[in-house]
């Protein structure tokens, strides 16, 4: 079974390569009756697209979305929504020198083992451009969730050696887009920018951490046992290119706590059951508790660096060196923010439908 | 879509509650021709079962497996294998006092929100006894993988405040079962035992970390984009009851590294492409690299503690206190070891078949 | 991907062989709050079980169902329901002489090609006993559907050379169980019984037709394009052992009609949109119209006959003759009636949930 | 779960409406290394496209395929292949008068019930134009199957009151495209053409039958129990717009036969196990036997006729009359031939991969 489809009740299938003609997504399971304009998609693609700031690759793509189906008189009809963008600034010749060489930290070698051949231009299908489809689909998911009072926001909480200080949600939302690193702690953001700059000068790259928060999710969505809400979030996040770790709520810290420290006491807030702490990160036994869902991911440094590296030539099966040219992001987390939001929104809307909270066919019902 | 099925080409469906009649699993997609004896299943269930040591719950269950289908003359036939164990030592009366009360850290509240009713006895379906089916199915997965030179081992690397020191794989395997905490660093294991004992005396529980290592996995399994090998591992691990974080290879540490530190240089070892470090944890771009797959999970402390806790009565929708009785593990990681191994084995066997490395119908081909 | 699971939102997985220890099914996706007693399952298994009349095999099995999970205080909890029956009257020695020989009309040869080995006793997994799991699961589906005013009934409309005359639905329901052939036209039933008797005496078997009718299905369930309601019904019915053709509404007759004859005119009946004819069989464009769903299946004669037949020995790869012993049904349709009802009920309940007409988690909402 | 995806190991997702911007398909699971040129797709789309003859609608669409991804240097790479055609000759104004009226025999009414709104122009998603994606994907499936010696051909065997006489396979292939009705019995074809002409003059439409034959399928593909090869074929065929019945091999005739007449005797033909008759239609117990797979479908007359018909206005919920304008096929079977071939090819390639006969990742292995 191939792996380019995500979700069950709200199901997306992405396609396209970095240097192919176009990239896109088909979204199946969007309930009818949702007002949908291209601008709602475009604003998220604009947050994701390359060339937007000094912390992203200089590749210049407008990534203008075309919506090809599933909309009638400005509203979704319940049929599949196909969306695409054309590749315009592909410079494939930059990749000629690496066509037989496995770039360290990239999937070149296992792709070759799996398929026998690969499209080496710009990483082909394993390029970050693949996330265009995710972000476009996620934009629809967000529009639906907004109608149910659910909001998803992601932000950078660490970059290189700089960590942001914890901030309240409204300040995160307010500051998020004020700086190209998408860190709401503006002081930390300044330092992060400097680390990015330094890395670029050293022909290096740096990693970081992205936190994703979903508020307004009602209690009781998710499925017990295997399709737990946190299990699906973990899959969604670990399935983003450079992510190497995922935690929910107290996460890694949980391993050092005692039961009485970890457990979040329940109490009544008016008619509502809430907890006084949120070590659970909004999920218990795989089901949402009604508290904010909090997820953090660790993002490795961009594997493409222009320092010389040791590797192998896969055609000759010999040791060799490589110096990667081409245009690359010096760090991934800032541009990953809209992708992480999209994946979280996709998981939640899927489970909202699966749990009977959103009608699978129509918002008009 | 309900959530009690895991895997695609090798697919398991588990069933059963803590205080129901029985628990079990149906395993579909086991290729024909695998020699299979009950003892191969039982030995893994014995590692999982309660009452095996001072660090586990005193509930006494033999958990004797019955294989009901799919075997003919000692070999698998390619048809579904149904396995079950009977519940024998259920003491449901212990739970009468909590039937309307949401235990902190447990799924009682969201279960009630989701389903309207719940089997409150021993956690019902959200009990750790649910993992019986996973371990039984995982035992079959391990038998198959062994025929392909793939080995899966898990061990406790942290418990409470004690961390184990890194050890070579052969020593991990040798020491793993020497101590009830399943920590291969025997000195650390001693200290861990003491922390468990202390926690029990304080009516507390402690968390810890489990590391899972798979060796012998060939390069090129996994699916790009959504069904990445690491994404499926993350889902599998986060889907185990108390797990709050999952990392692959350098994991959380990756966020602090520079590109040249994180990237694992490739080189030729004879005919084989290998890397000199393994920060990738054996997975690049969602595909196996041929290096050992390394995953670590953070496990929260057992939520059931006998200290009084603040919570709500879900029937009366009022604040209340709870003191949990019943029989509980003071810490989860030691008994989670066979569960984590099972989940890793299930993911790998599924992807081995999906990637065409194991014939989907028959090992005789 | 293995094939022992059916349905998406209401999903069953069956297991077990004719001469294994037991057979059963796990039903995942049953909403919570459904009152469920073993007797509701048993009454359908009793209609299916062997030895019930002169038109069925003399194998004597009580097929007493055990419900092992998913029920608490007489109600479903939303967790998987595992059900099983033990095999008691297996006489495996009858099959020793055919273990290397491909029975004509049976799956022995392609099973051997697929799996390399097979459980030859009583057909193993391809035995009609496999349908025990379907009928048990279908009984739950029927209980749910009844709460929504949906009723499913099947009956024999042809057996051998005898065809039943069309009857109104209430007479079909009234007469259905009055005769062992399950034909509501009692005069035709008499003749059918004689044909069965004659076939048995000639060491022959006969085929027939089963019609399945579902009433009360609301308009608008089903999914357009591939998962059409009629497409899923066709799959469900063709997936029953001996079925060789499936038609909906006018079915084969439709190919000879003109547009104005085939199209069912719509008109208002009070507040309700109905059609004056039902050539569509209750389905247009893959979606239910609100009219009765009408499906007919053609069932081949039992392949096991005690006349000598020409075939091959699969071990020696040589031509040979076979005379099949063992206990067999002289005709399949009468015992297929409850199986066909079960499959129809399973398809409809699955699509009722998929289309948002039944809450996926709980009937209490 | 939405329904626009078909297949498991070879999985297609179609999108697009009759009067939207474009229609297309994403094909996931195409193994790497298949040489693929647009012309291979186009030739099948040309067989399907409207305006090709006097028996098809006069709507004029070139349906020129664009391949947007998944190909590199003329070969598939194992990544998703996205294909699309632009709609060019949509005349939406023809549909203004029917926007609130349920066309008899069409899905307008249940669509409205399901989604609340619908794109009424040309049938929207339930238009026959939706099959563009199927045919494009099927063309890839056929290319793969050809490499394994598997060939799929469909032809019209009945139209209106005219039935074709049985012909050998090579003559079917030779004559198939010689006449616009795609009936290999050229004498019958002449009569069929006249019936089509007569129907058009009477403002009527006629139905017919399409037979699909697949040769070269090895024994042992398919999955037992629910995902039987014939069950999946039945679903595939019944999922084509106007199909009302599906039969395999002897099909409906099987219900009248005796066991000794129905059973196909096995014998050895050299090293190969074959049968002397093929009442099974190449499938036993859901698995292929190695004999040709033979399937017949009954196709209803085009529901769009320009005779006045009785129906209801869905907005006013009142009885009314309708006279359908617009451009329509007077009969469906001739243009359904490439669609039926595509669906059969999709089912077979999916099961070839599922059964381990075609490598899921690469034809280069």
Image (cartoon, coloured by chain):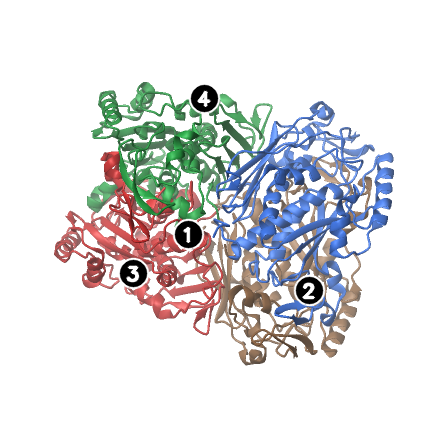
Chain colours: A red, B green, C blue, D brown
The answer for which chain carries disc 1 is A
In terms of depth relative to the viewer, which is nearer, A359 or B155? A359
Residue C26 visible from this viewpoint: yes
| N-terminal label among 3 and 1 | 3
Give a yes or no on whether discs 3 and 2 share a subunit: no
Element type at marker 4? loop
Whole-number angstrom distance, CA of label 3 to CA of label 2:
47 Å
| Residue bearing the label numbered 3 | A48
Circles 3 and 4, Cβ within 8 Å, touching? The answer is: no
Whether A186 is drawn above or below C342: the answer is below
Q: Nearer the viewer, mark 4 or mark 2?
A: 4
In terms of depth relative to the viewer, which is nearer, B109 or D23? B109
The answer for which chain carries disc 2 is D
Residue D5 visible from this viewpoint: no
Q: Position of residue A175 (x, y in %)?
A: 19, 61
Whole-number angstrom distance, CA of label 3 to CA of label 4:
55 Å
The answer for which chain carries disc 3 is A
| Residue bearing the label numbered 1 | A351
Q: Residues within 10 Å of mark 2 (few under 14, many from 20)?
A: many
């Amino acid at each position: 079974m191939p792996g380019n489809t995500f979700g069950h009740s709200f199901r997306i299938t992405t396609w396209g390569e970095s240097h192919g003609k176009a990239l896109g997504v088909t979204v199946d399971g969007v309930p009818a009756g949702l007002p949908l304009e291209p601008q709602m998609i475009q604003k998220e693609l604009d947050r994701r697209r390359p060339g937007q700031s000094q912390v992203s690759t200089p590749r210049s793509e407008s990534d203008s979305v075309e919506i090809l189906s599933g909309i009638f008189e400005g509203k979704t009809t319940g049929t599949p929504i196909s969306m695409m963008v054309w590749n315009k600034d592909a410079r494939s010749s930059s990749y000629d020198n690496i066509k037989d060489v496995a770039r360290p930290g990239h999937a070149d070698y296992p792709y070759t083992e799996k398929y026998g051949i690969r499209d080496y231009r710009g990483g082909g299908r394993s390029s970050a451009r693949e996330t265009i489809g995710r972000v476009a689909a996620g934009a629809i998911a967000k529009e639906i969730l907004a109608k149910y009072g659910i909001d998803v926001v992601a932000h950078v909480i660490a970059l290189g050696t700089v960590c942001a200080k914890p901030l309240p949600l409204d300040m995160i939302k307010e500051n998020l887009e004020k700086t190209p690193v998408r860190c709401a702690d503006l002081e930390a953001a300044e330092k992060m920018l400097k680390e990015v700059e330094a890395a670029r000068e050293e022909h290096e790259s740096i990693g970081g951490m992205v936190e994703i928060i979903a508020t307004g999710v009602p209690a009781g969505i998710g499925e017990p046992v295997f399709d737990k809400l946190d299990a699906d979030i973990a899959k969604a996040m670990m399935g983003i290119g450079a992510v190497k770790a995922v935690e929910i709520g107290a996460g890694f810290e949980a391993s050092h706590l005692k039961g009485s420290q970890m457990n979040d006491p329940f109490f009544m807030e008016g008619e509502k059951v809430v907890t006084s702490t949120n070590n659970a990160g909004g999920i218990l036994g795989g089901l949402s508790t009604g508290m904010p869902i909090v997820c953090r991911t660790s993002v490795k440094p961009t594997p493409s660096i222009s320092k010389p590296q040791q590797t192998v030539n896969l055609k000759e099966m010999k040791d060799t060196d490589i110096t990667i040219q081409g245009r690359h992001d010096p760090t991934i987390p800032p541009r990953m923010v809209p992708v992480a939001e999209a994946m979280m929104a996709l998981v939640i809307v899927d489970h909202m439908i699966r749990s009977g909270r959103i009608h699978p066919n129509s918002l008009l019902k």
